[in-house]
């Protein structure tokens, strides 16, 4: 009787665990399995997705956030216009790179879905994805460099406070910039 109860309990545990979705279950029906709908939208809209955090958290403001804080930063008309230009240029190229990344991810999915994945094909697609992701990240970081040159030290310090980052220290601190 004890063995029957134990087997019954074990079968209930196995059935319950089988009914629990795996962490990947939500991705099964996605067009691009590796990304959530939100991530796909981020790529399609040219968003930063945290790629420029080394710059952001070390006193190199991002153009989108500078525009959001333009009044608090007391941007001049010229600074605002330049920031808008920088942001739009950054966004357009980021969208192009994002679309290419999504295209390669869809190709990677198709290789596996069709059963045609080979080591060579996987290597080729993932190496291209690595390059594209590196290009996209460098692209976002370069615009943080440009913003650092556009703002004065007071504005950079104010930006850091408003964004909750505190004041940057060390070689990249608030008083090292090539701007005004």
Image (cartoon, rainbow, N blue to C red):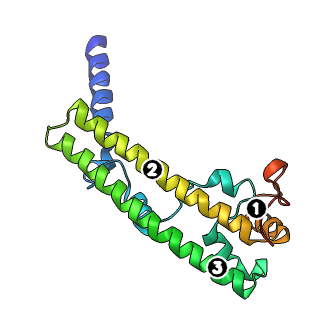
Q: Secondary structure at mark 3?
A: helix
Q: Which of 144/161 is in front? A: 144
Are discs 1 and 3 less than 8 Å apart at CB?
no
Tell me the CA gap for discs 1 and 2. 28 Å
Q: Which of 177/123 is in front? A: 177
Residue that lies at the very extreme toward the front in this rendered image: 178
Q: Quadrant of residue 114?
A: top left
Q: Which mark is residue 133?
A: 2
**Picture layout, residue 63 above or below residue 138:** below
Tell me the CA gap for discs 2 and 3. 26 Å
Q: Secondary structure at mark 1?
A: loop
Q: Which of 62/78 is in front? A: 78
Front of the two marks 1 and 3: 3
Quarter of the picture holding the C terminus: bottom right
**Picture layout, residue 101 above or below residue 18:** below
* 172 to the left or right of 80: right
Residue at horizontal 50 percent and vertical 64 percent from the top: 47
Tell me the CA gap for discs 1 and 3. 24 Å
| Label 1: few (<14), some (14–19) or many (≥20) C-alpha neighbours in 10 Å | few
Q: Where residue 159 appears, x then y in whole percent?
A: 76, 68
Residue at horizontal 79 percent and vertical 66 percent from the top: 156
Q: Where residue 113 appears, x then y in whole percent?
A: 18, 43
Residue bearing mark 1: 164
Residue bearing mark 3: 82
Q: Quadrant of residue 14?
A: top left
Q: Which of 114/134 is in front? A: 134
Quarter of the picture holding the N terminus: top left
């Amino acid at each position: 009787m004890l063995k029957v109860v134990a087997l019954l309990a074990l079968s209930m545990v196995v059935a319950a665990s089988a009914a629990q979705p795996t962490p990947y279950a939500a991705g099964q029906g996605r067009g691009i399995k590796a990304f959530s709908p939100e991530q796909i939208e981020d790529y399609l809209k040219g968003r930063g997705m945290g790629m420029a955090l080394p710059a952001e958290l070390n006193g190199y403001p991002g153009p989108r956030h500078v525009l959001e804080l333009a009044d608090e930063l007391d941007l001049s008309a010229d600074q605002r216009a330049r920031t808008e230009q920088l942001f739009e240029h950054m966004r357009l190229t980021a969208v192009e790179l994002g679309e290419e990344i999504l295209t390669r991810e869809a190709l990677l999915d198709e290789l596996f879905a069709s059963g045609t994945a080979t080591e060579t094909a996987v290597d080729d697609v993932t190496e291209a994805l690595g390059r594209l992701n590196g290009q996209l990240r460098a692209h976002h970081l370069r615009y943080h460099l440009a913003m650092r040159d556009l703002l004065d030290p007071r504005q950079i310090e104010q930006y850091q406070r408003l964004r909750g980052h505190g004041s940057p220290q060390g070689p990249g601190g608030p008083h090292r910039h090539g701007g005004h």
